[in-house]
Image (tube, grey):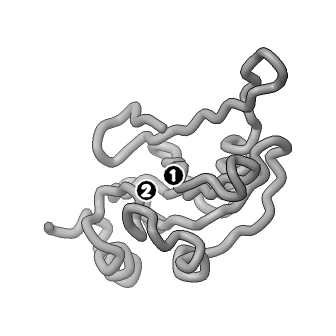
Amino acid sequence: MWSNGGATGLYEVRVFILEENRAVESGAPAAVADDFAKLHYCQARGNNLYAVRWVKGSAELEMRPEVYPTGDCAPDAGFSADYLVNTATGKIIQRGVVKEMTPFTDGCPSDIFPTAFTTQKQIEDYGKSNDYDLPKH
């Protein structure tokens, strides 16, 4: 996972699977990014994509796409969801909002992994407001 745009994004993920003596790129990150972008996408900047954790060894991967958290991505700025995806096939096993998936992310660095917002409450407050500027820290 890396950022091409600094602290708030553009976060990307590449995953590789070992097949015999070679590394093959998984389609899982693209499957998650494409599915999320069907309903939530920032036309100005694109979306962030985070790898949260491996599940069942490395057979599955929990990922969190996020709409870039800046005012030009309103009204969905900062919105994120959780996905559980099969690493080898890219098949989406489960999708849900962050609160629904919280039991699966316990022990991960934070509910908002990483983002420009400092707390989950800031994301929720921002979503309720009509002000599309970033919250003051």
Q: Which residue in the protein does label 1 denote?
A: 42
In the picture provided, is 92 more to the left or to the right than 30? right
The reply to whether discs 1 and 2 touch (Cβ–Cβ < 8 Å) is yes
12 vs 84, nearest the viewer: 84
- Does 127 sit above or below residue 6? below
In the rendered structure, which amino acid carries the disc numbered 1?
A: Cys
SS of the residue at dot 2? helix
Q: Quadrant of residue 36?
A: bottom right
Q: Residue at x 66, y 53 (%)?
A: 61
Q: Earlier in the sequence, mark 1 or mark 2?
A: 1
SS of the residue at dot 1? loop
Mark number, residue 16 = none
- Does 35 sit above or below residue 20? below
The x and y percentages for residue 102 are 53, 77
**Hey, which residue is sitting farthest top in the picture?**
21
Please state, as top left, top right, bottom left or bottom right, where the C terminus lies in the image. Answer: bottom left
- Does 60 sit above or below residue 20? below
The x and y percentages for residue 53 are 56, 55
Q: Which residue in the protein does label 2 denote?
A: 73
Q: Residue at x 50, y 57 (%)?
A: 66
The x and y percentages for residue 44 are 46, 44
The x and y percentages for residue 20 are 83, 21
In the rendered structure, which amino acid carries the disc numbered 2?
A: Cys
